[in-house]
Image (tube, rainbow, N blue to C red):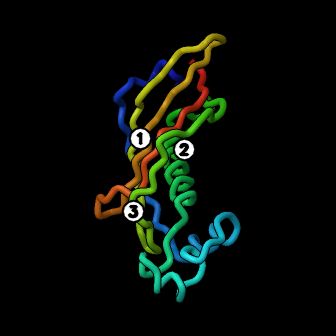
Amino acid sequence: MKLDEFTIGDIFETEAYKLSKEDIIRFAGELDPQYMHLEEEKAAQGRFNGIIASGIHTLAISFKLWIEQGRHGDDIIAGTGMNNIKFIKPVYPGDELYTTVEVINKKALKNETGIITLRLSTYNLKKEKVFKGDLSALIKR
């Protein structure tokens, strides 16, 4: 979809994604090597009572789920920013996440392009919000 095909207030819901302990450890081992994501025994003694996913991992899954919807396909040009990023609740091994995506702003630019801003809200299957963030992208009009 091009910018002009989106309407402010449009809401889309993604499929669910189940996160395994191995997924959490692999991601954290490479990109966020903190004990609460990697060390089961130490994490079990901490405030979360076990390993949790990195917030950056949760953000990446949220974005992946949106992209897999294919709504903007090849019309997207590039990301331009992220704002109001909030990691609200921990994500545990075995959690299934889904994301709702709301169009919160759009602005036409010159050269047949524009900026679209989307609010991603990610939930576990208990309908508890675990992540929220606004992402903007340059898109064809």
Q: Which residue is mark 3?
A: 89
Q: Tell me where residue 98 sits by quadrant.
A: bottom left
**First in sequence: mark 2 vs mark 3:** 2
Res 14 seen here? no
Give the foreground label among 2 and 3: 3
Could you give the CA–CA distance between mark 2 and mark 1, rounded to whole angstroms?
11 Å
Q: Is residue 136 left or right of residue 123?
A: right
**Which residue corresponds to the image point at 62% horizontal and 13% vertical from the top-left?**
112
**Which residue corresponds to the image point at 63% horizontal and 67% vertical from the top-left?**
27
Is residue 29 placed above or below 106 in the rendered structure?
Answer: below
Q: Residues within 10 Å of mark 3 (few under 14, many from 20)?
A: some
- Give residue 48's position: percent from left, percent from top: 42, 76
- Give residue 140's position: percent from left, percent from top: 60, 22
**First in sequence: mark 3 vs mark 1:** 3
Q: Tell me where residue 25 sits by quadrant.
A: bottom right
Q: Tell me where residue 28 sits by quadrant.
A: bottom right
Res 6 seen here? yes
Could you give the CA–CA distance between mark 2 and mark 3, rounded to whole angstroms?
23 Å
- Give residue 79's position: percent from left, percent from top: 62, 35
Q: Given contact means CB atoms under 8 Å apart, are the residues at marks 3 and 1 in contact?
A: no
Give the SS element for disc 1: strand
Q: Which disc, if any, is residue 101? A: 1
Q: Which disc, if any, is residue 67? A: 2
**Which residue corresponds to the image point at 45% horizontal and 51% vertical from the top-left?**
86
Q: Which image quadrant: the C terminus?
A: top right
Give the SS element for disc 2: helix
* Amino acid type for the residue under numbered disc 1: Val
Q: Is residue 68 left or right of residue 122?
A: right
